[in-house]
Amino acid sequence: MVIKKRLSPVLIFAGIINLLLFFTKYYIGVHTNSLCIYTDSINNLMDTLSLCLALVGISYINKPATDRFKFGFGKMEHVTTFIMSLIMTVAGCSFAYNSLSRLMTPVPVWYFTKYAVIIALTCLVKLLLGVVFSLGYKKTQSAVLKTVMLDSYLDCGITLMTLISFTLSNTVGFALDSVLGLAINIVIAVLGIRLIISSICELMGQRNEKLEEKVLLIIKTINKNIVINDITIHSYGDEKNFVTLNLSLTDKNIKLFSVQNKIKNQLKTELNCNSTVEWEVFS
Protein backbone atom coordinates (compact mmCIF):
# COMPACT_ATOMS: atom_id res chain seq x y z
CA MET A 1 0.00 0.00 0.00
CA VAL A 2 2.88 2.36 0.78
CA ILE A 3 4.38 1.66 -2.65
CA LYS A 4 1.10 2.66 -4.31
CA LYS A 5 1.06 5.96 -2.37
CA ARG A 6 4.50 6.75 -3.76
CA LEU A 7 3.18 6.31 -7.30
CA SER A 8 1.01 9.44 -7.10
CA PRO A 9 3.89 11.88 -7.88
CA VAL A 10 4.92 9.64 -10.80
CA LEU A 11 1.38 9.71 -12.23
CA ILE A 12 1.17 13.50 -11.79
CA PHE A 13 4.50 13.94 -13.58
CA ALA A 14 3.36 11.60 -16.40
CA GLY A 15 0.09 13.54 -16.68
CA ILE A 16 1.99 16.83 -17.12
CA ILE A 17 4.25 15.23 -19.77
CA ASN A 18 1.22 13.90 -21.69
CA LEU A 19 -0.43 17.31 -21.57
CA LEU A 20 2.72 18.93 -23.00
CA LEU A 21 2.82 16.23 -25.70
CA PHE A 22 -0.81 17.02 -26.55
CA PHE A 23 -0.13 20.75 -27.07
CA THR A 24 3.02 20.02 -29.10
CA LYS A 25 1.41 17.46 -31.42
CA TYR A 26 -1.81 19.44 -31.74
CA TYR A 27 0.17 22.49 -32.92
CA ILE A 28 2.11 20.36 -35.44
CA GLY A 29 -1.03 18.54 -36.59
CA VAL A 30 -2.86 21.79 -37.33
CA HIS A 31 0.13 23.37 -39.13
CA THR A 32 0.86 20.29 -41.27
CA ASN A 33 -2.76 19.21 -41.86
CA SER A 34 -1.81 15.65 -40.81
CA LEU A 35 -4.72 13.61 -39.45
CA CYS A 36 -2.31 11.06 -37.93
CA ILE A 37 -0.50 13.72 -35.89
CA TYR A 38 -3.78 15.36 -34.88
CA THR A 39 -5.20 11.98 -33.78
CA ASP A 40 -2.00 11.23 -31.86
CA SER A 41 -2.32 14.58 -30.04
CA ILE A 42 -5.90 13.83 -28.95
CA ASN A 43 -4.72 10.39 -27.83
CA ASN A 44 -2.21 12.14 -25.52
CA LEU A 45 -5.03 14.29 -24.14
CA MET A 46 -7.01 11.10 -23.43
CA ASP A 47 -3.93 9.71 -21.67
CA THR A 48 -3.85 12.79 -19.43
CA LEU A 49 -7.50 12.21 -18.47
CA SER A 50 -6.75 8.51 -17.88
CA LEU A 51 -3.87 9.38 -15.55
CA CYS A 52 -6.17 11.73 -13.61
CA LEU A 53 -8.58 8.80 -13.21
CA ALA A 54 -5.67 6.60 -12.13
CA LEU A 55 -4.82 9.12 -9.40
CA VAL A 56 -8.44 9.07 -8.21
CA GLY A 57 -8.41 5.27 -8.19
CA ILE A 58 -5.19 5.05 -6.16
CA SER A 59 -6.39 7.69 -3.68
CA TYR A 60 -9.54 5.62 -3.05
CA ILE A 61 -7.54 2.40 -2.69
CA ASN A 62 -5.48 4.02 0.07
CA LYS A 63 -8.59 4.99 2.07
CA PRO A 64 -9.32 2.89 5.17
CA ALA A 65 -12.41 0.67 5.34
CA THR A 66 -15.64 2.21 6.66
CA ASP A 67 -18.86 0.85 8.17
CA ARG A 68 -20.50 1.05 4.75
CA PHE A 69 -17.51 -0.42 2.86
CA LYS A 70 -16.14 -2.94 5.35
CA PHE A 71 -13.67 -4.47 2.89
CA GLY A 72 -12.18 -1.16 1.76
CA PHE A 73 -12.10 0.43 -1.68
CA GLY A 74 -9.82 -2.00 -3.53
CA LYS A 75 -12.43 -2.61 -6.26
CA MET A 76 -12.13 1.07 -7.23
CA GLU A 77 -8.95 0.14 -9.10
CA HIS A 78 -10.94 -2.06 -11.51
CA VAL A 79 -13.67 0.59 -11.85
CA THR A 80 -10.98 3.12 -12.83
CA THR A 81 -9.46 0.66 -15.33
CA PHE A 82 -12.92 0.13 -16.87
CA ILE A 83 -13.50 3.89 -17.33
CA MET A 84 -9.99 4.38 -18.80
CA SER A 85 -10.56 1.49 -21.24
CA LEU A 86 -13.94 2.93 -22.23
CA ILE A 87 -12.35 6.32 -23.02
CA MET A 88 -9.68 4.56 -25.09
CA THR A 89 -12.27 2.58 -27.07
CA VAL A 90 -14.53 5.57 -27.79
CA ALA A 91 -11.53 7.66 -28.90
CA GLY A 92 -10.28 4.87 -31.18
CA CYS A 93 -13.66 4.34 -32.85
CA SER A 94 -14.25 8.09 -33.27
CA PHE A 95 -10.93 8.76 -34.97
CA ALA A 96 -11.21 5.61 -37.09
CA TYR A 97 -14.37 7.14 -38.52
CA ASN A 98 -12.54 10.45 -39.14
CA SER A 99 -9.71 8.58 -40.91
CA LEU A 100 -12.22 6.77 -43.12
CA SER A 101 -13.91 10.07 -44.00
CA ARG A 102 -10.60 11.65 -45.00
CA LEU A 103 -9.71 8.57 -47.05
CA MET A 104 -12.79 9.25 -49.15
CA THR A 105 -11.82 12.92 -49.61
CA PRO A 106 -7.98 13.18 -49.37
CA VAL A 107 -6.40 16.52 -48.40
CA PRO A 108 -2.73 17.58 -48.71
CA VAL A 109 -0.23 17.08 -45.85
CA TRP A 110 2.65 19.59 -45.57
CA TYR A 111 5.98 18.10 -44.51
CA PHE A 112 8.59 19.94 -42.41
CA THR A 113 11.81 18.25 -41.21
CA LYS A 114 11.82 20.14 -37.88
CA TYR A 115 8.34 18.78 -37.08
CA ALA A 116 9.45 15.23 -37.98
CA VAL A 117 12.35 15.53 -35.49
CA ILE A 118 9.99 16.76 -32.74
CA ILE A 119 7.59 13.85 -33.36
CA ALA A 120 10.55 11.42 -33.14
CA LEU A 121 11.50 12.91 -29.74
CA THR A 122 7.93 12.55 -28.45
CA CYS A 123 8.09 8.86 -29.43
CA LEU A 124 11.17 8.46 -27.21
CA VAL A 125 9.39 10.23 -24.34
CA LYS A 126 6.45 7.77 -24.49
CA LEU A 127 8.88 4.84 -24.53
CA LEU A 128 10.57 6.13 -21.36
CA LEU A 129 7.17 6.61 -19.67
CA GLY A 130 6.32 3.01 -20.55
CA VAL A 131 9.55 1.80 -18.88
CA VAL A 132 8.74 3.83 -15.72
CA PHE A 133 5.22 2.37 -15.52
CA SER A 134 6.58 -1.12 -16.21
CA LEU A 135 8.93 -0.87 -13.21
CA GLY A 136 6.04 0.39 -11.06
CA TYR A 137 3.79 -2.47 -12.19
CA LYS A 138 6.43 -5.08 -11.28
CA LYS A 139 6.51 -3.70 -7.72
CA THR A 140 2.76 -3.25 -7.15
CA GLN A 141 0.94 -5.50 -9.69
CA SER A 142 -1.56 -2.64 -9.97
CA ALA A 143 -4.27 -3.04 -12.65
CA VAL A 144 -4.26 0.73 -13.18
CA LEU A 145 -0.50 0.79 -13.77
CA LYS A 146 -0.76 -2.16 -16.14
CA THR A 147 -3.30 -0.21 -18.21
CA VAL A 148 -1.22 2.98 -18.42
CA MET A 149 1.95 0.92 -19.08
CA LEU A 150 0.37 -0.87 -22.05
CA ASP A 151 -1.09 2.41 -23.25
CA SER A 152 2.34 4.10 -23.13
CA TYR A 153 3.98 1.35 -25.18
CA LEU A 154 1.06 1.42 -27.62
CA ASP A 155 1.38 5.21 -27.90
CA CYS A 156 5.07 4.81 -28.68
CA GLY A 157 4.17 2.49 -31.58
CA ILE A 158 1.39 4.85 -32.69
CA THR A 159 3.74 7.85 -32.72
CA LEU A 160 6.29 5.84 -34.70
CA MET A 161 3.63 4.98 -37.31
CA THR A 162 2.59 8.64 -37.31
CA LEU A 163 6.18 9.67 -38.02
CA ILE A 164 6.42 7.19 -40.92
CA SER A 165 3.10 8.41 -42.32
CA PHE A 166 4.11 12.06 -42.00
CA THR A 167 7.50 11.47 -43.66
CA LEU A 168 6.13 9.45 -46.60
CA SER A 169 2.87 11.34 -47.21
CA ASN A 170 4.35 13.68 -49.82
CA THR A 171 6.14 10.80 -51.59
CA VAL A 172 3.52 8.04 -51.52
CA GLY A 173 0.40 10.20 -51.48
CA PHE A 174 -2.01 11.95 -49.11
CA ALA A 175 -4.11 8.78 -48.66
CA LEU A 176 -1.30 7.18 -46.63
CA ASP A 177 -2.04 9.56 -43.74
CA SER A 178 -5.65 8.37 -43.68
CA VAL A 179 -4.82 4.65 -44.11
CA LEU A 180 -2.29 4.60 -41.27
CA GLY A 181 -4.59 6.77 -39.15
CA LEU A 182 -7.35 4.20 -39.65
CA ALA A 183 -4.99 1.32 -38.73
CA ILE A 184 -3.76 3.13 -35.60
CA ASN A 185 -7.27 3.81 -34.32
CA ILE A 186 -8.48 0.28 -34.97
CA VAL A 187 -5.59 -0.99 -32.80
CA ILE A 188 -6.52 1.51 -30.04
CA ALA A 189 -10.20 0.46 -30.16
CA VAL A 190 -9.40 -3.28 -30.08
CA LEU A 191 -7.03 -2.91 -27.11
CA GLY A 192 -9.64 -0.78 -25.32
CA ILE A 193 -12.32 -3.46 -25.84
CA ARG A 194 -9.99 -6.17 -24.49
CA LEU A 195 -9.25 -4.08 -21.38
CA ILE A 196 -12.99 -3.43 -20.89
CA ILE A 197 -13.70 -7.18 -20.95
CA SER A 198 -10.82 -7.83 -18.53
CA SER A 199 -11.96 -5.17 -16.02
CA ILE A 200 -15.60 -6.35 -16.18
CA CYS A 201 -14.47 -9.91 -15.41
CA GLU A 202 -12.55 -8.64 -12.37
CA LEU A 203 -15.56 -6.64 -11.13
CA MET A 204 -17.85 -9.66 -11.57
CA GLY A 205 -15.58 -11.80 -9.38
CA GLN A 206 -13.57 -13.79 -11.90
CA ARG A 207 -11.81 -16.81 -10.40
CA ASN A 208 -8.21 -16.02 -9.45
CA GLU A 209 -6.52 -19.26 -10.51
CA LYS A 210 -2.96 -18.04 -9.87
CA LEU A 211 -3.71 -17.09 -6.27
CA GLU A 212 -5.62 -20.33 -5.80
CA GLU A 213 -2.59 -22.36 -6.89
CA LYS A 214 -0.35 -20.47 -4.46
CA VAL A 215 -2.75 -21.12 -1.57
CA LEU A 216 -2.93 -24.84 -2.40
CA LEU A 217 0.85 -25.09 -2.59
CA ILE A 218 1.26 -23.50 0.86
CA ILE A 219 -1.25 -25.92 2.40
CA LYS A 220 0.48 -28.94 0.87
CA THR A 221 3.89 -27.82 2.15
CA ILE A 222 2.50 -27.45 5.71
CA ASN A 223 1.17 -30.99 5.92
CA LYS A 224 0.72 -33.66 3.25
CA ASN A 225 -2.10 -35.29 5.23
CA ILE A 226 -4.43 -32.33 4.60
CA VAL A 227 -7.26 -33.00 2.15
CA ILE A 228 -8.58 -29.87 0.42
CA ASN A 229 -12.35 -30.25 -0.07
CA ASP A 230 -13.12 -26.73 -1.21
CA ILE A 231 -11.48 -23.33 -1.61
CA THR A 232 -13.18 -19.95 -2.13
CA ILE A 233 -11.35 -16.66 -2.67
CA HIS A 234 -13.05 -13.26 -2.44
CA SER A 235 -10.98 -10.37 -3.84
CA TYR A 236 -11.51 -6.71 -2.96
CA GLY A 237 -8.61 -5.31 -4.96
CA ASP A 238 -5.08 -6.66 -5.47
CA GLU A 239 -4.09 -6.28 -1.81
CA LYS A 240 -7.21 -7.50 -0.02
CA ASN A 241 -8.09 -11.17 -0.49
CA PHE A 242 -10.18 -13.40 1.79
CA VAL A 243 -9.75 -17.16 1.59
CA THR A 244 -12.29 -19.70 2.90
CA LEU A 245 -11.00 -23.26 3.15
CA ASN A 246 -12.85 -26.50 3.75
CA LEU A 247 -10.28 -29.07 4.85
CA SER A 248 -10.00 -32.51 6.42
CA LEU A 249 -7.15 -34.60 7.83
CA THR A 250 -6.32 -38.20 6.98
CA ASP A 251 -4.27 -38.57 10.16
CA LYS A 252 -6.32 -38.22 13.38
CA ASN A 253 -3.18 -37.83 15.52
CA ILE A 254 -2.34 -34.42 14.05
CA LYS A 255 -3.20 -31.43 16.23
CA LEU A 256 -5.99 -29.62 14.40
CA PHE A 257 -5.56 -26.11 15.80
CA SER A 258 -1.78 -26.16 15.40
CA VAL A 259 -2.13 -26.91 11.67
CA GLN A 260 -4.89 -24.30 11.34
CA ASN A 261 -2.74 -21.57 12.89
CA LYS A 262 0.17 -22.43 10.60
CA ILE A 263 -2.08 -22.20 7.54
CA LYS A 264 -3.55 -18.84 8.57
CA ASN A 265 -0.17 -17.35 9.50
CA GLN A 266 1.55 -18.45 6.28
CA LEU A 267 -1.30 -17.24 4.06
CA LYS A 268 -1.13 -13.86 5.79
CA THR A 269 2.66 -13.61 5.71
CA GLU A 270 3.34 -14.90 2.19
CA LEU A 271 0.21 -13.85 0.27
CA ASN A 272 -1.31 -11.14 2.50
CA CYS A 273 -4.56 -13.13 2.62
CA ASN A 274 -6.99 -13.28 5.52
CA SER A 275 -8.39 -16.79 5.87
CA THR A 276 -11.15 -18.83 7.47
CA VAL A 277 -10.61 -22.57 7.91
CA GLU A 278 -13.47 -25.04 8.24
CA TRP A 279 -12.75 -28.68 9.15
CA GLU A 280 -14.65 -31.81 8.24
CA VAL A 281 -14.08 -34.39 10.96
CA PHE A 282 -14.40 -38.04 10.01
CA SER A 283 -15.67 -40.30 12.78
Image (cartoon, rainbow, N blue to C red):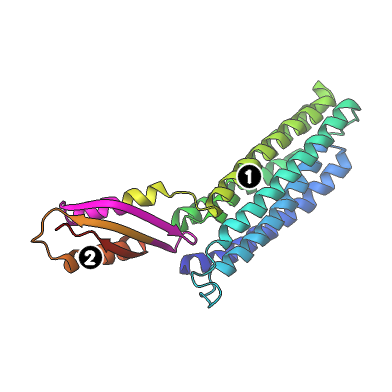
275 sits left or right of 173 in the view: left
For label 1, the residue is 124
Count residues near mark 2 (Cα–Cα under 10 Å), then give few for <14, some for 14-19, many for 20+. Answer: some
**Residue 11 point in image, percent of width and height:** 61, 61
Position of 191 relative to 52 (above/below): above
41 sits left or right of 234 in the view: right
Mark 1 vs 2, N-terminal side: 1
Residue 228: within the magenta?
yes
Count residues near mark 1 (Cα–Cα under 10 Å), then give few for <14, some for 14-19, many for 20+. Answer: some
User: Does the rendering let one see residue 113?
Assistant: no
Which quadrant of the view contains residue 233? bottom left
Q: How many marks?
A: 2
102 sits left or right of 50 in the view: right
* Numbered tag placed on residue 260 in the rendering: 2
User: Does the rendering let one see residue 276?
Assistant: yes
Q: Which of 216 and 149 is in front in this view?
A: 216
* Numbered tag placed on residue 190 in the rendering: none
**What's the CA distance linking mark 1 and mark 2?**
53 Å
Task: Identify the image quadrant of the C terminus.
Answer: bottom left
Q: Which of 50 and 159 is in front in this view?
A: 50
Q: Nearer the viewer, mark 1 or mark 2?
A: 2
**Residue 162 point in image, percent of width and height:** 73, 36
* Amino acid at the residue labelled 2: Gln
Q: Which residue occupies 14% across, 53% down? A: 250
Q: Which of 23 and 2 is in front in this view?
A: 2
- Element carrying mark 2: helix
- Element carrying mark 1: helix
**Residue 279 point in image, percent of width and height:** 24, 61
Position of 195 relative to 141 (above/below): above
Residue range highlighted in magenta = 215-242
